[in-house]
Amino acid sequence: MLYLRSILLGVLSLITLTVSSLGQDGTLNGSAVPTPVPFESDRYRIGLQDTIEVQVFGQPQLSQRVRVNANGTINLFRLPEPLIAVCKTERELANDIADAYRKDYLRNPEVNVTTVEQFSQSYSVIGAVEKPAAYFITRRLRLLELLAIAGGPSKEAGSGVLVARRANASVCDPRNANDDDDDEGLTLMSYKLRDILENRVDLVMRAGDTVSVLPADVVFVYGNVNKQGQVTMREPITLTQALASAEGLKPATKKDEVRVFRQKPGEAERIEMTFNLKDIDSGKVRDPFLEPNDIVAVSEDKAKSILNAIGRSLTQGVGTIFYRVTP
């Protein structure tokens, strides 16, 4: 763990050194630093409950501050119909407002839009990090960056990191346009902390993601056991040992199809393995060792329902501290 913390501290130091070396004129050690032009999809898009400031130059009576309505629209002075604001960039909305005023009210309006309060791009980091909290960040970022913003793993961190992603977290993301998951759908992804800190995992975060740095290596036991939840792995653990740690099976539980879900390295997809506990008890089949973040399902529930239940248990652990991080 000391090795992993050293890597992250090095990343943080590099970021700090780069920022501190920038002069007021945007130069680095006397050389001009080119300003990257973000793709339109990378720019902040206005979300529900955001507060925006509209300035119409030369028309102070039309300048105002409004909050985006629950249906994604805003109401402005002198405009008979509300305008759609959600999922638009500030420039796109400014152009739409100018067009609306030009139609019946002003000849050549010049409009500027600024989002003064952004509440739609939040990311939560919980578990064994220095600053667990919900963070409001107005740009795209990757998992390593988010962990760095949260202060990095604490001394209590284990080797596993879970990311719970809601299926409908960002309605502005075109990648979600064909998502068939229901409103409660969650994707649960697990990674090794070492792989993240050594930049072998390049996960782009989405608004609404919850990242959990596990305080120790764990497996999850779900279904017809007396104590569902996490089982800590202080040493290698087998399937039957994990079930014993969950205080055993409930009466009349079927033993012939106990499933283990294991995530493929670097992917959201999980492989499913089925074991017969009777064969293990009789010595016909070897008692399999589990890996960190395995899910043991003593249940006939669908894999999606099991993952959703575990994901919801993670997102319920989000703290009440909030931070706003600006570019």
Image (spheres, helix red, strand yellow):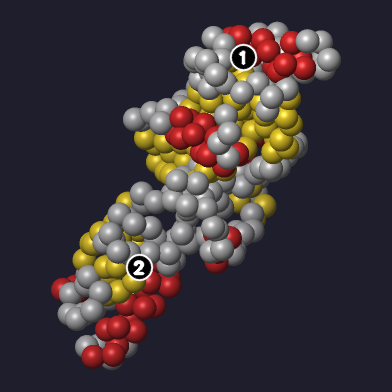
Kindly check if marks 1 and 2 are in contact, taking CB atoms under 8 A apart as contact. Answer: no
Classed neighbour count for the residue bearing mark 2: other residues with Cα under 10 Å, few (<14), some (14–19), many (≥20): many
Q: Is residue 259 above or below residue 279?
A: below
Q: Secondary structure at mark 1?
A: helix
**In the image, is residue 50 above or below residue 243?**
below
**Which quarter of the image is occupied by the N terminus?**
top right
Q: Distance from label 1 to label 2 (Cα)?
A: 51 Å
* Relative vertical location of residue 26 with respect to residue 272 in this rendering, above or below: below
State which tag comes first along the sequence, 1 or 2.
2
Relative placement, left or right, of 41 versus 101 is right
Work out whether residue 67 or residue 253 is closer to the camera in this orientation and state it: 253
Crowdedness near tag 1: few (<14), some (14–19) or many (≥20) residues, C-alpha within 10 Å: many
Please report the residue visible at 26 percent of the width from the left and 61 percent of the height from the top.
69
Q: Is residue 214 visible?
A: no
Foreground mark, 1 or 2, reads 1
Q: Looking at the image, which residue is at 61% across and 19% down?
A: 218
Q: Residue at the spot x=18%, y=75% of the render? A: 77
User: Badge 2 is on which residue?
Assistant: 85
Q: Quadrant of residue 237?
A: top right
Closest to the observer, 16 or 152: 152
Q: In the image, 53: left or right of 141?
A: left
Question: Could you say where residue 35 lies in the image, as x and y percent from the top left?
Answer: 60, 59
For residue 6, above or below residue 311: above
- Reading the image, the residue beneath label 1 is 243
- On the question of residue 190 being in view, the answer is yes
